[in-house]
Image (cartoon, rainbow, N blue to C red):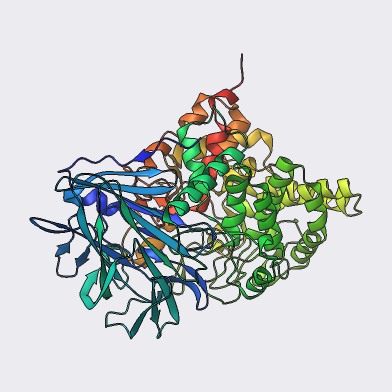
């Protein structure tokens, strides 16, 4: 059962600014996407009707950044698209004619009233294809002529904006009545098919000094020229419509737009049907989060051996997770944290297994990749926690599915991970033989999830022994001991013994009786404080939230109460307590200012999942646990319409920031929403 359509609160005559600030997003399961503002005016360099993830040239490319939709009337032409310019002028009439914007399932739908003609527009990306389809239907009123002017670009999405004019754009018709468009300078080729076939007029046009407002606000280059090769004209008749299908690949036959929309409807209906624990008792918020989770699971396929496997028929075994839209690619840490919510809470067990196997193939020197940069470069490994989150993800997978065979298959790989850490591996990561705790320190690198870096400035270096690393390390050892006993492995007792030592050392080193909570880092380079960092951060919550809590039971309530009192907000946990030096109440400004606030107070919604785990462990699943999530339904109507943002300001009104759709934000809020269902409350 699909959720009730999510509608943006809007009435004709309202302030159009919310339409410019609200963004929609659809994806294709390959890392590509289409996204823009409800207003139709692009505000980010990443916005585009078509941003495919290509294998050649590699990476995501903004190839169709804008589509102007010009409706002819007796009193003039109305542009339902448009742009904003550096001089402050704005081109576009959408806000005058918009009557409704909604999400039907995952499909964005606009309804415009243009001089008595009710026109519906919707967008879909067929799953597994580098294709987008935009459809217009005349619901009622007189016929209208629609002119569609595409603006084209070949820029990879992470490349700088180039203000000067683009290179040559070659256009030629193909045998099926579509247009083949080639941007030779970028090596990008598009196929554009308008149905019913309309006349294309070659009329090159340049909009100069187009402003990308959000890029200016974020301190990046923020203007460029936009280039259009011409336009189509098509007549919209009552009960009829038109559709534009754009693809980066070859098409065997003319596309059927209605079939593309129906296939997507059937796919997401099947996803909801397959999702375990989703039935008559699942509410609209849960169903909406289940659909939001679908945006992030991808077949990567643009890394060399994955592409080769896909071409040989083995590509179904590769899966990954896009960490956030628009600019993140797949990150090891984010993937493993998000895996439970994105796959296990949605019944997508085969994809969970594929993700775990995919990343196991990338482990090097006992480390999981931190990230795969855009394009075809090698993975980067500068992370201490991603590898331990892998154990956590596998543990949750085995517990949910009973698939002990995967644990057995991966056990030798995980043995190697443990041994590399005991001996010591890259970036100063290794086990301290004196206490069994894991240390990590590499000058100029950020190794934990608090990874902000601006130039040479590592904002939160956390060198030494961070608290959550010990919690994850202990959890990994206990999981390994359990799997080892099941398999009859000789090293199971050794893992248990090392875990016992870690737990004793953790109690001795991290608990501060004076403060009543845990140190954030011990044995760091700050000699003034004996190397211990007592700043109050949320990382200590993992000491009692994981499957095997390292924290002694006697301290659970104190840690939970302290985090609740100083760090909990309606949208997540602050990354630094307000009374600590360096606390930043707002996440805003240019890159250096934002990075300086990223983990210095800024709220991260993904942390609420582990806070609720800790809450349930201490208090049980009562009504108060669900009350902690009451901001979720409202946020689904904000910036990333139907999804959850990356971060929020630390102080009310907690304005959202960062990515408009973040994998671990969605995953952990979905997981927490399911965990706090009212029927899960204990019965008296």
Q: Is residue 382 left or right of residue 3?
A: right
> Eyeballing the image, is 306 above or below 460?
below
> Eyeballing the image, is 599 above or below 516?
below
In this view, the residue farthest toward the left is 75
When asked about the image quadrant of residue 376, the answer is: bottom right
* Residue 375 or residue 528, whichever sits in front: 375
Q: Quadrant of the C terminus?
A: top right
Residue 500 spot, x, y in % from top left: 79, 47
Q: Is residue 150 left or right of residue 3?
A: left
Instruction: Tell me what residue is drawn at x 68 percent, y 42 percent.
Output: 549
Instruction: Tell me what residue is drawn at x 59 percent, y 26 percent.
Output: 680
Asked whether the viewer can see residue 639, the reply is yes
Residue 482 spot, x, y in % from top left: 82, 45
Asked whether the viewer can see residue 515, the reply is no
When asked about the image quadrant of residue 317, the answer is: bottom right
Q: How many marks?
A: 0
């Amino acid at each position: 059962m699909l959720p009730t359509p999510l509608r943006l609160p809007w009435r004709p005559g309202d302030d159009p600014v919310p339409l410019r600030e609200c963004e929609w997003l659809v994806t294709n399961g390959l890392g590509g996407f289409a996204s823009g503002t409800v207003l139709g005016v692009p505000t980010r360099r990443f916005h585009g009707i078509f941003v495919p993830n290509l294998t050649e040239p590699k990476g995501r490319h903004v190839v169709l950044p804008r589509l102007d939709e010009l409706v002819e009337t007796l009193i003039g032409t109305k542009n339902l698209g448009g742009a904003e310019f550096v001089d402050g002028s704005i081109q576009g009439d959408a806000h005058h004619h918009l009557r409704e914007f909604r999400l039907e399932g995952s499909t964005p739908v606009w309804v415009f009233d243009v001089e008595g003609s009710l026109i519906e527009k919707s967008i879909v990306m067929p799953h597994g294809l580098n294709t987008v389809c935009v459809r217009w239907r005349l619901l009622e009123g007189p016929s209208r002529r629609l002119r569609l002017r595409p603006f084209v670009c070949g820029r990879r999405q992470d490349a700088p904006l180039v203000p000067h004019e683009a290179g040559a754009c070659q256009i030629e018709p193909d045998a099926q009545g579509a247009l083949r468009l080639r941007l030779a300078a970028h090596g990008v080729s598009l196929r554009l098919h308008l149905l019913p076939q309309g006349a294309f007029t070659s009329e090159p046009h340049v909009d100069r000094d187009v402003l990308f407002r959000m890029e200016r606000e974020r301190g990046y280059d923020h203007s460029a020229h936009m280039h259009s090769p011409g336009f189509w004209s098509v007549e919209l008749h009552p009960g009829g419509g038109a559709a534009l299908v754009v693809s980066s690949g070859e098409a065997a036959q003319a596309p059927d737009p209605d079939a593309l929309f129906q296939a997507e409807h059937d796919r997401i209906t099947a996803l909801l049907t397959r999702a375990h624990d989703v039935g008559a008792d699942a509410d609209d918020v849960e169903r909406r989060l289940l659909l939001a989770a679908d945006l992030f699971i991808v077949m990567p396929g643009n890394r060399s051996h994955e592409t080769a496997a896909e071409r040989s028929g083995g590509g179904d075994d590769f899966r990954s997770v896009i960490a956030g839209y628009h600019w993140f690619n797949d990150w090891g840490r984010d993937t493993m944290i998000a895996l439970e919510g994105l796959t296990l809470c949605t019944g997508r067990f085969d994809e969970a297994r594929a993700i775990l196997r995919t990343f196991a193939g990338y482990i090097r020197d006992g480390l999981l990749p931190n990230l795969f940069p855009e394009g075809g470069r090698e993975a980067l490994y500068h992370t201490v926690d991603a590898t331990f989150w892998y154990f956590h993800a596998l543990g949750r997978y085995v517990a949910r599915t009973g698939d002990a065979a995967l644990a057995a298959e991966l056990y030798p790989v995980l043995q190697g991970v443990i041994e590399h850490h005991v001996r010591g591996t890259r970036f100063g990561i290794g086990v301290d033989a004196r206490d069994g705790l894991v240390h990590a320190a590499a000058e100029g690198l950020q190794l934990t999830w608090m990874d902000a870096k601006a130039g040479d400035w590592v904002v939160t270096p956390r060198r030494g022994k961070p608290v959550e690393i010990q919690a994850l390390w202990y959890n990994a050892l206990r999981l390994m001991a359990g799997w080892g006993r099941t398999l009859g492995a000789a090293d199971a007792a050794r893992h248990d013994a090392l875990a016992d030592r870690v737990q004793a050392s953790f109690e001795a080193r991290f608990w501060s009786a004076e403060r009543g909570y845990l140190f954030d880092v011990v044995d760091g380079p700050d000699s003034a404080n004996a190397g211990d960092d007592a700043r109050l951060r949320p990382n200590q919550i993992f000491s009692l939230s994981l499957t095997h809590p390292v924290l002694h039971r006697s301290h659970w309530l104190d840690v939970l109460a302290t985090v609740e009192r100083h760090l909990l907000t309606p949208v997540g946990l602050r990354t630094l307590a307000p009374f600590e030096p360096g606390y930043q109440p707002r996440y805003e400004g240019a890159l250096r200012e934002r990075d300086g606030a990223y983990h210095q107070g800024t709220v991260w919604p993904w942390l609420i999942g582990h806070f609720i785990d800790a809450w349930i462990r201490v208090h049980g699943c009562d009504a108060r646990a669900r009350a902690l999530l009451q901001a979720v339904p409202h946020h689904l109507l904000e910036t990333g319409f139907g999804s959850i943002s990356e971060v929020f300001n630390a102080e009310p009104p907690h304005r959202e920031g960062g990515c408009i759709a973040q994998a671990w934000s969605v995953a952990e809020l979905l997981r927490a929403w399911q965990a706090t269902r009212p029927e899960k409350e204990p019965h008296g």
